[in-house]
Image (cartoon, grey):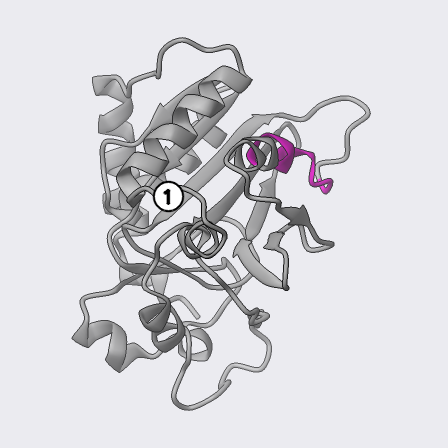
Amino acid sequence: MKILFSPSSAAAFNLAAEEYFFSGSEDDFLFLYVNEPCVIIGSNQAVVNEVDMDFCIEHDIRIVRRLSGGGAVYHDKGNLNYCFIHNQRAGQSPLSGGFLLPVMDVLKSFQVPVQMWKRKDLWLPGGYKISGTASHVSRKRELHHGTLLYDADIEKLHRALTPENGRIHKRATASVPSPVKNIRTYLHENGLEYPPSDIFFDLFTKEMKKYYSITDLQMLENHDVEYVETLRKNKYSRREWNHKL
């Protein structure tokens, strides 16, 4: 397992990096990153069905389409994103939620008692969602990625993900709204330490390294960055991809 923390906060770069690790390698990866404010939509979603375009333009919230299916999610600097990429494993269904077990173990070490529900998402007591996931699978490889709401701007999340005109493209995949809560809010409400986002993300990364018995984070090599930048420019930064529906 190679663990990397992205040097970039650009959603287009980080989604391009995910595809690069998925398609261009046979190694196992845990890729962690934090994005500037953006909405990430599923591969089969229509932007107009999921997003308040005027609000996003006014607040400089980028819209980027990902490789996997599923629903739309909001990212900002209070949201940690994780992506597990590996070869398919004999006897293990790529549709299982086993990839979430390390995330659950680390959160429980911070006294966050999460549970996995049937859609392979993570919930706090009281029925609040803190992490949604999506997957993309090829004949040989699996990609499973998710969000982790730590201290996101919940008001902007709701506004950005509430389209003004309702659904227009009936055949596009629709998101399934859920009540959400920040992990930091939960920690504060329960008398636990609630560090700022950057410190929590660093602690989370250190615990992941312990889980996998890894000493050092991997770095993107220059040739990796060049390939990712090309993919970012030619796909994830282009309107033809991001607004194809």
> What residue appears at the point 40 percent right and 74 percent down from the top-left corner?
158
Q: How many marks?
A: 1
Residue 40 within the magenta-colored segment of the rendering: no
Residue 87 position (above or below residue 166):
above
> What residue appears at the point 47 percent right and 64 percent down from the top-left corner?
72
Outermost residue to the front: 191
Asked if residue 17 can be seen in this view, the reply is no
Which of the pair 17/216 is nearer the observer?
216
On the image, the x and y values in percent for residue 50 come to: 44, 74
Figure quadrant of residue 58: bottom left
Outermost residue to the bottom: 165
Which of the pair 219/151 is nearer the observer?
151
On the image, the x and y values in percent for residue 146 come to: 50, 46
Residue labelled with disc 1: 15
Within-10-Å neighbours for mark 1: few <14, some 14–19, many 20+: many
Which of the pair 25/103 is nearer the observer?
103
Q: Quadrant of the C terminus?
A: bottom left
> What residue appears at the point 24 percent right and 27 percent down from the top-left corner?
225
Is the magenta region chiefly helix, strand or loop?
A: helix
Figure quadrant of residue 195: top left
Q: Is 142 situated left or right of 208 in this image?
A: right
In magenta, the rendered stretch is: 95-103
Disc 1 is placed on an element classified as helix
On the image, the x and y values in percent for residue 148 come to: 46, 48
Residue type at mark 1: give it.
Leu
